[in-house]
Amino acid sequence: MKNRALKIILAILVLIILVFLAGPRMPKATYDSAMPSIDVPVSAVASYIDSLENLVPAIRPDNEAQVVYACDTAPEKTPFSLVYLHGFSASRMEGYPTHVNLAKELGMNAFLARLADHGLETEDPLLNMTPDQLWESTKQAIAVGKALGEKVVLMGTSTGCMLALKAAAEYPDDIAALILLSPNIRINNSTAFILTWPWGLQIGRQVVGGKYRVLEKNPVTDPYWYKSYRMEGTVYLQQLVNDLMNKELFGQVKQPVFTGYYYKDEEHQDQTVLVSAILWMTRELGTPPDLNVAKAFPDAGEHVIGSELTNPNWMKVYDACLDFLQTRVMPEKVTLEWENPELFRIGKEDPKATFFAFNSPEEALESKREVSPNFLSLNGKWFFKFSESPNQRPAFFYRDDYQMKDWDLIDVPANWEMNGYGYPVYVNAGYPFMPDPPKIPKTDNWVGSYRRTFTLPEQWNGQEVFIHFGAVSSAFYLWINGEQVGYSQDSKTPAEFNITQWLHPGENTVSAEVYRWSDGSYLEDQDFWRMSGITREVYLYSVNSLHIRDFFVVPGLANDYQDGSLALDVELRNLSDSARMSTLEVTLVDQDQVLWTTEHQVHPIDTLISLTDTIPGVKAWSAEQPNLYTLLLTISDEEGNPIHSLSRKIGFRCVEILNNKLMVNGKPVYLKGVNLHEHHPETGHVIDEATMKLDILTMKSHNINAVRTSHYPQPERWYELCDQYGLYVIDEANIESHGIGYHKDITLADKPEWAAAHLDRTINMVERDKNHPSIIIWSLGNEAGDGHNMLADYNWIKQRDPSRPVQYERAEKSTNTTERHTDIWCPMYASIGYMVNYANHPMSDRPLIQCEYAHAMGNSVGNLQDYWNAIEEYPLL
C-alpha cells in the first residue's frame, strides 16, 4: 500500500515537473551576424535617419534617433564616429550631454540610436521588444556609425553596454573602443533568473501584480524613460543577460574599454545592476590591461551616471571618458577649431573697408545708417546662458525646439565679467592659463551661449543679407535658424557672414556660442584686463545682389603738395545668376559742391574697377587741419536707376620718410602721442561714442596729436572721429604673444603653423581701416617675438598699401630673419642715452620714434622734458 502511494506521489511530482517544463516561455533569440550597409553620402545620413524615423508612428519628443555632425556646415566622414546605445526602457537622453560633448570635443560625427520598440507613445511599452530586435537595431546603429566615421566608438548605458560588448566581439575590425556606463552584466535581483524559466512571465506578473511593471514617477526623466512597461520586456531583458553576458564573449573583446559605475560603499552603490558582476566582466575581458580602464564614481548616486538629468556630477564621468579616448584610443585626435592655429575662419566674409550701402546717392550723403531700410540693429537684450567650461555648455541650444529654461538676458554689446558672469583677470606679460600652444584648458574656459530672434523686413526679399559682429572675444560659432553658418577668431576686428540662404520670411533666430579662450588667445596676450563676450555692435544689413563689396581709396598729394591725387580701386560683386550691365559713378564733394565726378560702364565680367586722377587745389588733411571731403560711389542699373550707393569721408595727405624723417604733407612732424587701450571703468571693453569724443577732445586740449592703438584695432567709429577731429593714428594689429617668449625656437612669430593666423589678423586690420586719413603708420603688433611670420606680414602690407610706413618694435632685435621689416626704429622704454647714441650712429638710417616710453603708472613722468629736449635736438628722433 505504501509503495503504491509513493508511486502515485512520484507520478504526480513527475507530472507537475513535466507540466512545469512544458509551460510557456519566451522563444529563444537568434543573433544574425550579417551587417547591414548604409549607402548614402555622409551629408545625407541625417536626412536618411530622419526619413526612417518618420515611418515610425508616435515617437515621443526627444526620443528619436539623431545624427550629430562634427561640422554642420560641411559634413564629412570623420576618423572616428561615436554611436550611443541607450539602456532598457530609456532613450538617448540617458547619456546626454556626455555623448554629444565627447563627439564635439574630439571632432567625431555621432549617432544617438533609438533601440527597437523604445521611445514610442503606446499603451503597451516594450510588449514587442525581443533580443533579436535589439540586436538588429544595434547592427543598424553600427552601420550608421560606419557611414559617419572610419572607426566606431561604441558607448552604452546599462543594457546598451550588453549590446556593445556583443558587437565588439562580433565586429573587431569596425569597433575601435567601448565606453560602458553602468553595464548590465547581472540584474541586481537574486530572483531575476526565474523570469526565463517556464511560466516565468506568469510568475513575474504575479510578483508585480499585473501585466505591467510600474516604477515611481519622476517629472525630470519621465519624458525619456518608460515608467510603466509590459512584463514581457523584463523577461526578454533577462534572456539577453543569459544569452550574452558570459566569460566566453568577454574574452573575445580585445578593444580598449572604459567601464564606469556607481559605487561608494556596500550601502551606497548601484541598485539596478550588480557591481560585483561589472567587476567580474572587466577581469574577464580580452582587452590588454593598459587599455582596460574601470572607474567607480562614488558621488554619482544613481544607476544612470552619464546624464545631467540624474547625476549632478556627470562632468566627472565625462572627464574620465574624455581622458580615456584621448590617451588610449585617439592620442592623435582631430583638433577643434579653437585648438587649431591654422583654422580661424569658417564661412566668414573676407575683410573689407568700413562703409554702409544705401539705396540712393541722397541717402548715402545723409549717411544715417540707423534710419536706412537696409539696416537692422541686433544690439540690446539677448537670451544668455553662461557655462563654466565647454563641457557644460548647452550643446543644442541653437535648435528651434530647444527650451531656454532658466536663461538670463544680457546686453549686447557687453563683457560677461562686467555683468556678473565670471570675473575680470588682469595679466601683464603672461597668460591667464598655463600656456601649451595651441591647446586650451577645458576648465575655466567659459562659454557664453547667445540667442535672440528678429523679424526679416519684407523689403529685404530678393536682397543679400549679411550679419556683422563688430568684435567677439575670443572665438565664436554662429547659427541661423538652427543651421551652422560659420566660425571666427580675432577679438578686435569684425566678423561678417552672408546668411541669405538660411533666412525665411518673418521671424528668424540667431545663435552664437562664444568661447573665452581659443588658440587665438595665444596671439592676444596684451597687458590689460582680460574679459570676454560680444563687445562691439551687432547688426544685419541688406544689399542688392549687384553691389560694391569693397573699395580702396588713396587720396595723396601731387605737384609739390598743392594738388590732390586720387587712386581708387572698386571691387564689384554680383551674387545673382544673371549677367548685368551697370554704371559706376564716382563723385567728390566738398560740403555741397561737386569738385569732381566720373562715370564708368561696368560690364558683367568686371570685378575690379581702377581709377586715377588729379584734383587741383585740394585742402590737405593733417592733425592740425583735418580737412575732409566726401567720396560718393553709386551703382545704377541699365535703366539708370540707383541700386547701391555709399559715401566715405576722405582726406588728401601724404605720408613719407624722407632723409630719415617722418613727413606728413612734405613737412616733418613730431608725434606727441599716447598709447590707448579700449577700456571703460564701468563697461569694460565696450566704449560708447561720447567716451571716444571725450578722450579725443581731452587729448587735443593737451596738445596730443597722435595715438597708437595699443595693442589691437579700435572700434570703427574711433577712426572716423580721429579723421574728423585730427589725430594721427598708428594702427596696430591684434597680435601679441609676449607670454610665450622671444627666443627663436619658441616664438610663435617664427612657427610656420602660426603664419596664416598672423597674416589673417594683419589683413583684417588693414582692409577694414585702409581708407582713413588719420592712419599714417601700420604696426605689425606688440611684443610678439619676431620671425618669418612678421616678415610676411610686413611684405603683404607694403604690397597692399605702399602709401604708409610700417613699424614693429621687435623687428630691430630680430635674429630670425635678416630682411628689414620695419620702416621706423621704434623701441620701447629706451633711455635718453640710447636715443642720443642712435641719432649719432653713422649706420642709423631710419627715424627713431619710441612706441612706448614714459610710462605714467605710479610715477610723475618727471623726465619727460629731458626726453623732448633730446628729441628736438636730433633730426633722427
Image: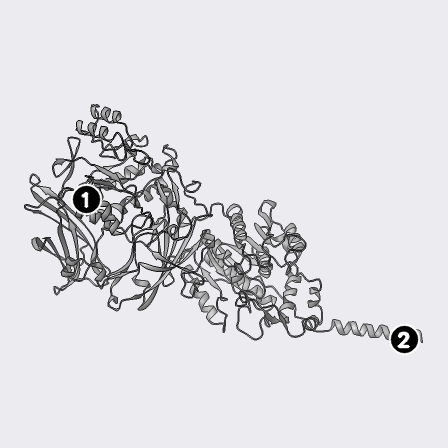
Residue type at mark 2: give it.
Ala
Residue 534 located left or right of residue 248: left
The quarter of the displayed image where residue 123 is located: bottom right
Which structural element holds mark 1? loop
Depth check: 675 or 35 in front?
Answer: 675
User: In x, y percent, where is residue 300?
Assistant: 58, 55
Amino acid type, callout 1:
Ser
What label does residue 5 carry, if any? 2
As helix, strand or loop, the secondary structure at mark 2 comes to helix
- Residue 215's quadrant in the figure? bottom right
Whether 450 is drawn above or below 323: the answer is below
Res 749 quadrant in image? top left
Q: Is residue 768 visible from the viewing direction of this image?
A: no
Image: 53 above or below 439: below
Percent from the top left, x then y, of residue 660?
A: 17, 31
Which is in the foreground here, disc 1 or disc 2? 1
Residue 95's disc is none
Query: What residue appears at the point 67 percent right and 62 percent down from the top-left corner?
Result: 242
The residues bearing labels 1 and 2 have C-alpha atoms spaced at a distance of 119 Å
Image quadrant in which the N terminus is located: bottom right
Measured along the vertical axis of the image, is residue 540 above or below residue 436?
A: below
**Crowd band around label 1 with a 10 angstrom C-alpha radius: few (<14), some (14–19), many (20+):** many
State the residue position of label 1: 774
Pinpoint residue 319: horizontal percent, then vertical percent: 52, 50
Its colouring scheme is one colour
Quadrant housing the C terminus: top left
